[in-house]
Amino acid sequence: MKNAFAIVTLSAVLSACAVAPQKQAEPAAAAPADAAGESAAPVAAAPAPAPAEEALPNVDLTGDMLFRITKAELEFKQGNWQGPYITMLALAQQTRDPRLARRAAEMALTAKQGPEALSAIRLWRGLAPNSDEATQYFLGFAVVNDDLSEAEQIFAERLKAAPPQARPLAMFQMQQFLLRAKDKAAAFALEDRVLAPYSDTLESHLILAQGAFTLGDNERSRTEAEQALRIKPDSELAILTTAQVSGDIDTALKVLSTFLDKYPKSREVRAAYARILADAKQTELARQQFLILLKDQPDNMATLYALGVMAMQANDVPNAEKYFTDFVNALADHPNDERDPSKVLMILAQIAEQRNDLDAAYNWLDKVDGADEKIYLAARMKMAQLTARKGNVDEARKQLAELKPTEAVDQAQIFQADAQILRDAGDHRAAYTVLENAVKRYPDNPDLLYDFALVAEKMGQPELMEKALRQVMIAAPDNQHAYNALGYSLAERNERLTEAYTLIDKAMKMAPDDPFIMDSMGWVQYRMGNLSEAEAMLRRAYALRSDPEIAVHLGEVLFAKGDKAGARQMWQEAQTKDPKNDALKSTLARLNQSL
């Protein structure tokens, strides 16, 4: 009874003292959901207490041993690994108890000491040769260190010992281990040799097909996939491998299409077929395939997301909103799913805002959690902007003030958002103060400097504006907006027009299709008296973006050319789009015109 009591006590001591190791770099073997129909648990988990069936030695837990174990554990918790590791390893060698070797391995793994961990694992496996856990740990280390000779023997023995129904899972576990090998050719050769006795199985050919593809041996990969299809003609993984090595998209599509004609219920193949069609810009055909998938599984999140993206790309906003809403609802019904809905929520908020449903937009944004700090911050800033648009500027600014980002660039964005809210409310002086303080805090931030420059101009300080924009050009020489803003400001004030033209021309070379830079170029051409060039440029800009201010400028050029009817038409279009447009009001007053 004394020895029995000692064994129980040792188990209790080890269980109480065990500290789960931190996540390590060792490979975890898990069979993919495939023909085997199931997957194995990760093998590189923290060593668990020894199973009841494992033969354990009778250990007399003396006072000295208990003291050494307790002391080792206390030192380990204090951050010391080497002494505790040596103690556990020595005790394991002395007592021949695999639990102590496992604990030594735990300590080395937690301390990220690979060689010491391997020594402990070797001892653990020697003391518990039937321990699958110890074997899998050892295999992980052997493969990562390209010690494949001993690993090969173990893999072969495991496959031979496995009953036929469990052998496919063991094959896929071997494949997962070998994915971590640095020498891919050697790993594939090992697979080829170990799987040779099982050439009548589907799984052996699937594994070899994938291994050959990884090495770039498409011919061997194709041959193995064809062998798999002979064994199981409806194998989705085999036909997907065949398509993968086909050489071009058209052939791959034909391979998958032919397979789907025979086996229309093959979801993975149809999903791959739909994705390839989408990549090939065959959007309508891809959409039809995704709709077939959706009909079969209405709450499939991958399908809903794909259809939502395609609808957005086609500017089909109603369907995009429907699919993305269904995606969010389906995700809510699967709380263990790790997909992050943040980007979809941002899109739904944007859609709602575009139809002026500010409450719906706000509610979508409120669902964005902090999983992605950048997206969360963007959502909260947008919520503040929506609050301001609903007339509560003070509450909006309070919402911004409550945000506490960790990075300086994010804090700068909050200052920008705060200033924009004030500018939209017409309080340019307060916006100026916010940005002035922000620039003092972050003097090298080009975005803050740019916004400060625009507000400085509004406050009648063109010299300060130019100074800030020159700083932007130094900090971000490829920032076309800085060159454009300064050039336009000079043209608007009818000053230094040659320099204004040079600045805007430089901006146009950086962004030749930007309608607002085109507008600036048209405006400086007008100021320089080049009316035809001005009209041509402004018409190009307006064709790209029917912005009210571009319409106002084009109207003034037409007015200067004597086309009063054309000018009136452009101004009326501007008025329809933005009845309160300041540029329109000042232009009509300056030219003594009315609409």
Image (spheres, helix red, strand yellow):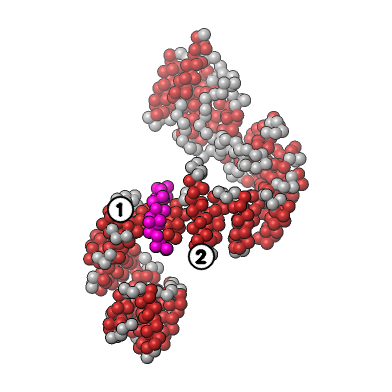
The disc placed on residue 31 is: none
Question: Magenta segment: does it hold 364?
Answer: yes
- Secondary structure under badge 2? loop
Q: In the displayed structure, does residue 404 sit left or right of residue 370?
A: left
Three-letter amino acid code of the residue under disc 2: Asn
Q: Is residue 493 above or below residue 27?
A: below
Q: Residue at x 65, y 51 (%)?
A: 269
Tag 1 residue: 399
Q: In the displayed structure, does residue 470 sit left or right of residue 215?
A: left
Q: In the displayed structure, does residue 404 sit left or right of residue 318?
A: left
Q: Quadrant of residue 158?
A: top right
Dominant secondary structure of the residues highlighted in magenta in the image: helix
Residue 487 in the image, given as x and y percentages of width and height:
34, 76
Three-letter amino acid code of the residue under disc 1: Gln
Q: Nearer the viewer, residue 4 or 529?
A: 529
- Secondary structure under badge 1? helix
Residue 302 in the image, given as x and y percentages of width and height:
55, 51
- From the image, which quarter does the C terminus lie in? bottom left
Question: Magenta segment: does it hold 565?
Answer: no
Mark-to-mark CA distance, 1 and 2: 32 Å
Q: Residue at x 31, y 63 (%)?
A: 420
Asked whether residue 23 appears in the rendered view, the answer is yes
Q: Please report the bounds of the magenta region as a residue range.
A: 353-376
Residue 468 in the image, given as x and y percentages of width and height:
28, 68
The disc placed on residue 315 is: 2
Residue 476 in the image, given as x and y percentages of width and height:
37, 65
Q: Nearer the viewer, residue 232 or 472?
A: 232
